[in-house]
Amino acid sequence: MGAFSNEELSFSSNFNFASSQDLRFSKQIHDNVHGNIYIDPLYLKFIDTEQFQRLRDLKQLGVAHMVYPGAVHSRFEHSLGVYWLANEAVHKLKTHQGMELGIDHFDIQTVKLAGLLHDIGHGPFSHLFEREFLPQVRNGLDWSHEQMSVDMIDHIVDERRIDIDSGTIKKVKVR
């Protein structure tokens, strides 16, 4: 952080301009772990919602920071990192086994979106919220962050009228 190097300007070898939108329409975010992350317009439509933005206030590791002061990243940061790593992984697979596996644009889109949205249904205090808190407050409530993620994805797509293939959304929501 703070120091400038030419490495910061380089793109991942797996970033594929041809399969991506024009970078002028993408957003660049600097991540402390992964460097520059480029987010295409489709994914920005999900990120720019209050449902996703609330992840900024949820700690990825719950109360672990009380024992490990450096463990302080948010679910927002985590989700952006997973989006980027999913992008890297699926492009590696496409490069090395794409023909065998039949990886296409929709597969890449699905993997990236699933990575981005996998934690969107989480409540506060990580898994402690759903395993310990909710059962005591709402006796017999059958609630999971996975199902809440599915419900939130549907809500975002409907509310924001996001134009996305229904098959892609169905695959993203598979638990």
Image (cartoon, rainbow, N blue to C red):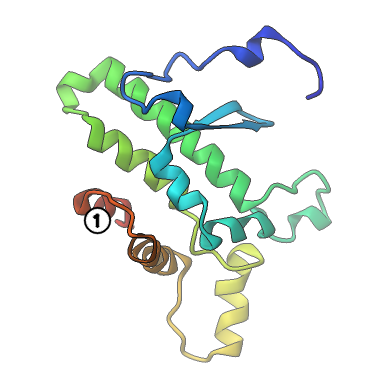
Q: Position of residue 96 (x, y in %)?
A: 28, 15
Q: Position of residue 167 (x, y in %)?
A: 19, 51
Left or right for 101, reference 89 = left
Quadrant of the image containing the C terminus:
bottom left
Q: In this rendering, does residue 44 appear at all?
A: yes
For label 1, count other residues whose C-alpha is less than 10 Å away and answer few (under 14), some (14-19) or many (20+).
Answer: few
Give the amino acid type for the residue marked by disc 1 in the picture: Lys
Left or right for 162, reference 84 = left
Quadrant of the image containing the N terminus:
top right
Q: Position of residue 147 (x, y in %)?
A: 39, 68
Q: Residue at x 50, y 17 (%)?
A: 12
Near-viewer residue (153 or 160): 160
Q: As displayed, is residue 74 above or below residue 5? A: below
Q: As displayed, is residue 166 above or below residue 133? A: above
Left or right for 10, reference 57 = left
Q: As displayed, is residue 59 above or below residue 19? A: below
Q: Residue at x 30, y 34 (%)?
A: 108
Q: In this rendering, does residue 59 appear at all?
A: no
Counting every numbered tag in the picture gives: 1
Left or right for 14, reference 4 = left
Near-viewer residue (147 or 24): 24
Q: Residue at label 1?
A: 170
* Rendering quarter of residue 146: bottom left
* Rendering quarter of residue 133: bottom right
* Rendering quarter of residue 160: bottom left
Near-viewer residue (48 or 120): 48
Can you name the residue that lies furthest to the front here?
24
Q: Residue at x 32, y 51 (%)?
A: 172
Q: Position of residue 76 (x, y in %)?
A: 60, 50
Q: Secondary structure at mark 1?
A: helix
Q: Residue at x 37, y 64 (%)?
A: 150
Can you name the residue that lies furthest to the top here?
6
